Image: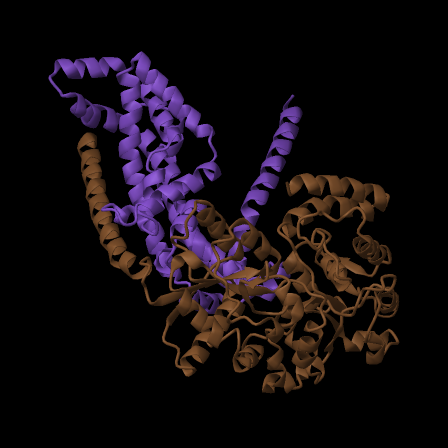
Chain colours: A brown, B purple
Amino acid sequence: MKKFRFKRLLLAAAAVTATVLLAACSSSKGSSSSSTSKDNKTLTVWCWDETYNTPAVKDAIKQYKKENGKQKVKVVTMAQDDIVQKLNTVLSSGGSKGLPNIVLIEDYRIQSYLKAYPDAFADLSSISKKGNFSSYKSAVNTVDGKTYGVPFDSGVAGLFYRTDLIKQAGYTDADMQNLTWDKYIEIGKQVKAKTGKAMLSLDPSDLGLIRIMMQSAGSWYTKSDGKTVNIQNNTALKQSISLYKQMMDAGIVEKVSGWDAGVAAVQKGQVASAPTGAWYSSTIQGAKDQSGKWKIAQIPRISENSKSVNASSIGGGGWYVIKGVGNVAGAKDFLGKTFASSPALIDQLAKDIGAVGTLKDAKSGANYKAAYPFYSNQKVFEDLLSWSNKVPEVNYGSSTYQIEDVMKDPVQSILKGQNINTVLKNAQAQAESAVQ
Amino acid sequence: MRAKRTALNTVKYLILIILSIVSVFPFFFMIVGMTNNSVAITGGSLHFGSLLADNFKHLFASELDFVGSLKNSAIIAVVTTAVALCLSSLAGYGFEIYKTRRSENIFNFLLLSMMVPFAALMIPLYRMFSKLSGTPFQIFGVNSFYAVIIPTMTTAFLIFFFRQNAKSFPKELVESARLDGLSEFQIFTHIYMPVSKNAYSAAAIITFMTSWNNYLWPLVVLQSPEKRTVPLVLSAMGASYTPDYGMMMCGIVLSTIPTALLFFFMQKNFVQGMLGSVKG
């Protein structure tokens, strides 16, 4: 009896398998023709973040229709790590089958793709004109004089600060302009003493702030060729790390673990400022009860470094076209009529997702001229865009993230009090072997 | 003596209680998270909120098509499990019952393949599947469910598992069945299979779970958004400057249910199967 039941079960399983196999077969047949063929008219765009980049592409599609663009465009949201994984696998398998026509790539990563797969990306020099964008963006997407990307959002850094807490500490808005980091730490100590709140939150394993400081002095983990590791004798890096240490030692830092904890610290009102990228704006505005209490100032500079300016960048990305997928002309047409040239679109994006553009012409847009109540009626977009144009150009090279992985431990050792020169000397050797 | 034993028991239970709290807490947090918004979740709130309905509404309204991904995952996991059980049990049984020196060598070679990490196979595999386009086998190529299923259809582990099971299967049964005039295939289907029910259950749970949770290969090989599986959709949801954690928690709970159910229903068989019991 038991045996009989089991047999019936097996039969049922076999039947299910057969049906499902058939179903899977027919469904894959159905869509393989619509999504993989090369002469397909529909352009596919890959990007990450359903609340930021995806709506940006949708706005671009609307704009494109207004300009009577003929291509159909479809956007697919994926995690950034997933996009990276897919690009790596497919490009290193020697093809481009399955990749989209257009893909969003972070500024820190693009050089490694352009160097490793020089034939994979289409030359966009004809639509992406250097002079039209914040100049630091073109250092990122150019190889041998050819421009491969259309710059998208600006990662321009700003010092978001709470006007009420700064005031309680005895400072005014004027004091927050053109700061040096030394002065920033001094204000932080006052804030801590008078209000009990931390000046900023930092995740010790995230070196974003050090990157901001370095770039403000036009320096990076690698030299301007993008390859030579530049750690041991990098003055700007040394100054940045010691400032980082000074902040930690001054007791003005709320230490957090992970991105979300940092967001929580801001939204709960535990910190008086956040030196970070312009894209942080929408996150801060999540704390609706703090409306009218925030302002944005230029990012502080390194006082001991004469090259350091009150402008820097963190993050940000650009659009790239993959040649082997086909319909390069169509993809160029789409990007050319939207992200590469349309101030109206960039203006719309400021409103819809709070993205600061890098297109210089966008500064006359209505949203760039507008005053924002959340930021005490500051014209934040106008300010951020004008700072974006001053960000020093830096070649991020092909190994920013690899070197940063190496740098995490050395930075911790320095924070604990080890000699900075010895530690960085070792880090240099480690980083050199990591990027080989 | 008795006092000593009580003390020992207390310690034992204390440790067990702590361990169970540690293992249950993530589930608890996940379920509390279903009812809160992102701010509360990142703030570490452990109180039930009132946003359960909203979070579900967002989940089903999301353009990432969560329901579709559940369907895709189900198709892939069920087919993979069914095919893998058939093929691997046949192979494991064969390796044990029809043992020759050559088959032993092949088997050892097969075991060696367990040592190769998938990451190392991925690029060549992708190349193989992408070469299928333009040939009559195009439907098996990239961006099809076949491409997800085929490489995971047989695993060295499963074959090994069934072989171990077949080892404790009494050979006398095979011989007497032969005398009774059953064909070799009938011996497999009529005698071995019913007797090894527990092994099949255990293998089914393991295969289903691996396939359901499989991330890397589907990520690489599936392209069109309407074919994405659950882990891919969850991953895409999380990748945001301002992720909606409440919605994600709902998605995660829903995606845990099928494996949890399968496990609960087959738990008894699973344990016996892993012990290698042959009592049918």
Total numbered badges shown on the rendered structure: 0
Q: Position of residue A114 (x, y in %)?
A: 55, 54
Residue at 26% from the left image edge and 51% from the top image edge: A24
Q: In which quarter of the image is the N terminus of chain B?
A: top right
Vertical relation: A356 (above or below) B91: below
Q: Nearer the viewer, residue A215 or B211?
A: A215
Q: Which of B258 and A340 is in front in this view?
A: A340
Relative horizontal placement of residue A144, taking residue A55 as reference (left or right): right
Q: Position of residue B150 (x, y in %)?
A: 32, 40
Q: Position of residue A123 (x, y in %)?
A: 50, 63
Q: Which of A180 and B242 is in front in this view?
A: A180
Residue at far front of view: A145
Q: Can residue A429 be seen by looking at this rendering?
A: yes
Vertical relation: A91 (above or below) A131: above
Vertical relation: A235 (above or below) A153: above
To which quarter of the image does residue B108 belong? top left
Residue at 31% from the left image edge and 62% from the top image edge: A39
Residue at 53% from the left image edge and 53% from the top image edge: A81
Q: Position of residue A198 (x, y in %)?
A: 80, 64
Q: In which quarter of the image is the C terminus of chain B?
A: top left
Q: Can residue A290 be seen by looking at this rendering?
A: no
Relative horizontal placement of residue A285, taking residue A177 as reference (left or right): left
